[in-house]
Amino acid sequence: MVSVNLGMLHYVLDHIYGAVMHRSRLGTPFFSKGWGGTQLALLERMVHDLFPELEARAQPPSMIQPIWRTIWESRTACLREGVFKTPCDEQLISALPPESHTARVAFLAPKLGDPQRMACVVHLAGTGDHTYERRLRLAGPLLKENIATMVLESPFYGQRRPMMQQGAKLLCVSDLLLLGRATIEEARSLLYWLDSEAGFGKLGICGLSMGGVHAAMVGSLHPTPVATLPFLSPHSAVVAFCEGILQHGTAWEALREDLAAQKVAMTLEEVRERMRNVLSLTDVTRFPIPKNPKAVIFVAATDDGYIPNYSVMELQNAWPGSELRWVKGGHVSSFLLHNSEFRRAIKDGLDRLEWKESAL
């Protein structure tokens, strides 16, 4: 009985947090400026351009050349910050806000030892994670395991946030898709840089919540085996914005009015269905199985008010050989209480990879 009550407490905590963050009138909701295009057909074409067919997605990552500065260093570790031009193609760059054209990363790495005998994991941002700090706190203890961490600041977040955007509340539906596509391209290029330039012997990609969705996509598309570690993540953005707590923070009426301005009359229920159709393109079960599915470890919360359990299991079932682990808690409490479980999954996923052979 106690465990059931604790589970309900975690679930209620998610809803209280969601009510404060997403149902209150203190700030704007998600997508308050509509779909992001003057015509619905234009938006549909843009979405299909952002998530092209499988053959196009298999193209190799673009090379980047980050410019580094040292934030601090100790006898055993060093934290650097790097900047680089986003590797997205010109069509995507023109669609991104100017503030998002330059990517920023924090790179926390051991100073001693051969990189070929070290691992590095790229950690992607969850919804509302505008800074490096939360992910660097998760990364710090991994240094003792000879695991470096690279933390990417997402487009539309932090110093890359558009001037008119309040916090994490993206103004248009198209912004969510742009954020995802740019994050995927940047993360793929970072993995390529860590392999070819930095020379790490093993690589991983992880993220919490929205970052976990993007991590799963990156791990799926990477041409060589990487540890793929989605934490507290759904199989699709549909789940987050149409089923979970975030549906209460979405500007459904503004989306309906945007369609009406384009002479497209829809009920609110039809608007929700339209959103499902658009966001279905983010369904990770449509992506290829990663090269080494045994190095894929999902970590989900038993009483998550944002992500229903079925969604996590749907993705795990789509990738045979992957592992699903459960932590007791909700979405918010697991962020706060289960960093040790996330670190264990990172280490275990990397342990399931072979060391890269030396080029010598």
Image (spheres, rainbow, N blue to C red):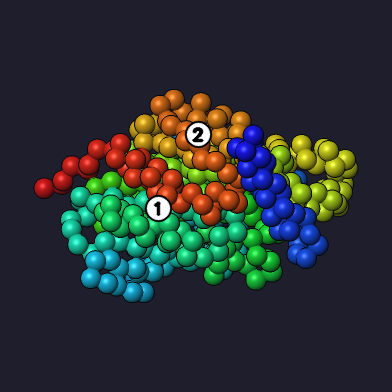
Which dot marks residue 122? 1
The image shows a total of numbered marks equal to 2
Disc 1 to disc 2: CB gap under 8 Å: no
Find the distance from the CA under tag 1 to the CA under tag 2: 20 Å
Left or right: 122, with 351 as reference point: right
The residue shown at (40%, 42%) is 345
Q: Which residue is mark 2?
A: 287
Left or right: 283, with 347 as reference point: right
The first of marks 1 and 2 along the sequence is 1
Considering every residue shown, the one lying at the far front of the view is 1
Residue 137 horizontal/vertical position (percent): 43, 61
Who is closer to the viewer here, 333 or 9? 9
Q: Quadrant of residue 295?
A: top left
The residue shown at (38%, 45%) is 344
Q: Element type at marker 2?
A: loop
Residue 55 horizontal/vertical position (percent): 46, 34
Who is closer to the viewer here, 47 or 8? 8
The disc labelled 1 sits on which kind of residue?
Answer: Val
The residue shown at (43%, 56%) is 138
* Residue 194 appears in the picture as rendered: no
Left or right: 44, with 208 as reference point: right
